[in-house]
Amino acid sequence: MEPFTCFMVSTDSAVPAQLDVENSRSYIDELYSEENCKCQEAIVCLKNAVIGSNKKKGSIISQGIVPRLIGLLCNANKPLQLRIDAGIVLGSLAKGTESQVHSLMRFNTVEVLIAIVFDPCTDERLMETCLGALQTIVQYPFAPLDLIHSDINNIKRLIQIAAPKSSFSCQAYVVNIFVPLCHSSHQQKNLCQAEVIPFLARLMISDNTTLQVPALKCLAAMCFTNKSVSNVVHSTYHAERSILDILTALLSRTRDVQVQLSASRCLTYLHRSGALPAEDYRIVYKTLPCLARLCSDEFDEDTRATAAETLAYLAEIDSELQRLAAISNHLIASLANLVKCPSVLSRQGAFRCFASLAANDEEIRKRIIEMEGLMEEVLSGLKDCCPEVRLSAVRCLHSLSRSVQLLRTTFQDHSVWRPLMNLLVGDPSLELQTVVTSTICNLLLEFSPAKEPMLESGAVEMLCELTKHVDPALRLNGSWALMNMAFQAEQHVKTKIINKLGMDRIFQLLGDRDERVIMKTLGLLRNLLSKTLHIETIMSEHSSEVLRAVSLVLDDPHPPEVKEQALIIISNITAGAREKDYVLQDEKIVKKIRDFLVANDNKLQMGAVFVVRNLLDKSSRRQILRKWGFLDNLEQLLRMTPRDSQFYEDIRHEILRFDYSEDH
């Protein structure tokens, strides 16, 4: 909003409200007059001319008038009203386009405004004007917020300026200035240390929405993904009431809708930061129902969209909250209506909330997909011109793709795989690529009908390229999808994967910095080396590379669950390779297996016993294994194992097999 004083007209002469600045050179000249009266008349004309007109704002800036305005504002020898009007014009210019605000930055406007605001001798009306301009500028992402954060006393000074006895405008401006100052963890903690939380609590109980809403927004921003600040909020009291109780009271239906929504966001962020458990009554019986109610059609579109987005975040990682939300206040029907609204925020919020609700529960997925026309809306969202809508639509598909039934029916009927693969063409964001490829991982599961057409459309090549990506999440999804593709696949598919990926790339993936990538690559090898015929074919061509890859994993300092996967691959080879004892010919691997029998880890012990079981299937191997000390280590392992366990019986059985003759 423009300051109310913007339309003041000089009493000496009437000035047209929409003066054509571009054609009034004399008027511009008078702005530089040393006669205060003439300068005052000129600046009032200027003030009235630029209100609501970005074109005239741009003209003023391009004519180099900003330095003169700053000079008038800073000059303590000029009349107070002249200085105030100069500040009002600067505040009005700050409401222009981004490029116009960038131009203001070049003249150190923020530094000037801060200096006047923090000057204890500044008149209150001038201070209000400068605070208003400062409030406008700091909302931009490129604003120099460090000028305030550089000294914690700056924040404390702003709190003092907005003391209870100060004007309503000062308090409103200060709390709005604080809202964008919470972007980073450092900024959040800085505000916390400056005692901003008690200041916000005071405004929250003011019963004035103009103060309450920005105070709640600031508190929410301070708590967002910040556990330490959230813990402080959790333990803070004001006027003998905890902030948690204050927030809960603000969820009442009798409160202003924006107050309810903002308080819900505070409690949501407190929960997600770890300060409030999911089962806390404030979350289950207050916050969640409030957000579900605010998603209904009786509220305006922006409120519904924000409520849906917040509810999605609240329930994102908790299956019980997802279940409760899905049965609250006809939420699924409300979201189905919201997703049909034209605004970006509405579609984005609805898709994201659907994604959250459908993350874990098959019954919820079924209820969502049964909403008339929903799948068409999701597919339309994939083509939306707004990247945020596309991302939210893919998130929705990702959650729905966890359903075996939907993969076989709805996803197949709509050929969902095709627009998903199309999204990877061009230069999509990393976040979008990650969610798309996570969904593709599910579409490539063995029971999915989309697997064959995706193979024919170049999925192998696309995924192999993905494993080379610099981003670890995309390398993970590439190796994960290839692992799914190789599960119970035909020989020609496995051969294509090996040929396109290459053993060199497999070696690189097994040496990846991300342990999850290593695990999925081992899973890929495990699926490739299944079925006797496939094992024989692959090992006949790649035995040395495969064994070297497995040996690499066994040698490196990986946790037991990683090495366990390598042992399963070795076990598959020993079981499936009939023509040649590939494993026994690698003395290094054999000794590793023998040593794992008596390792101080149950996973390694069990994996090694599993390998021994398959090795002993051929009687010709038994003497070799006895010679290398396998029997001794099995007997030692037997002594280490509780007698009442199934593992004890498994070990005992393998020991007995050493004594079988070939005739047995």
Image (cartoon, rainbow, N blue to C red):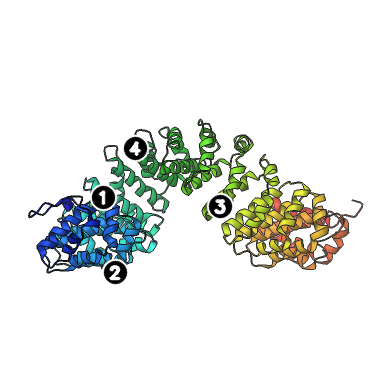
Give me the C-alpha separation between circle 4 and circle 3: 33 Å
- Identity, as a three-letter code, of the amino acid under mark 2: Asp
* CB atoms of marks 2 and 1 within 8 Å: no
Q: In the image, which is nearer the foreground, mark 2 or mark 1? A: 1
* Residue shown at 35% from the left, 45% from the top: 264
Comes first in the chain, label 3 or label 2: 2
* Residue under label 1: 52
* Residue under label 4: 300
Left-right relation of 267 to 552: left
In front here: 19 or 325? 19
* CB atoms of marks 1 and 3 within 8 Å: no
* Residue under label 3: 433
- Percent position (x, y) of residue 133? 24, 58
Callout 3: SS: helix
In front here: 628 or 468? 468
- Identity, as a three-letter code, of the amino acid under mark 4: Asp
Give me the C-alpha separation between circle 2 and circle 1: 35 Å
- Determine crowd level at label 1: few under 14, some 14-19, many 20+ residues with C-alpha closer than 10 A: some
- Determine crowd level at label 4: few under 14, some 14-19, many 20+ residues with C-alpha closer than 10 A: few
Q: In the image, which is nearer the foreground, mark 1 or mark 4? A: 1
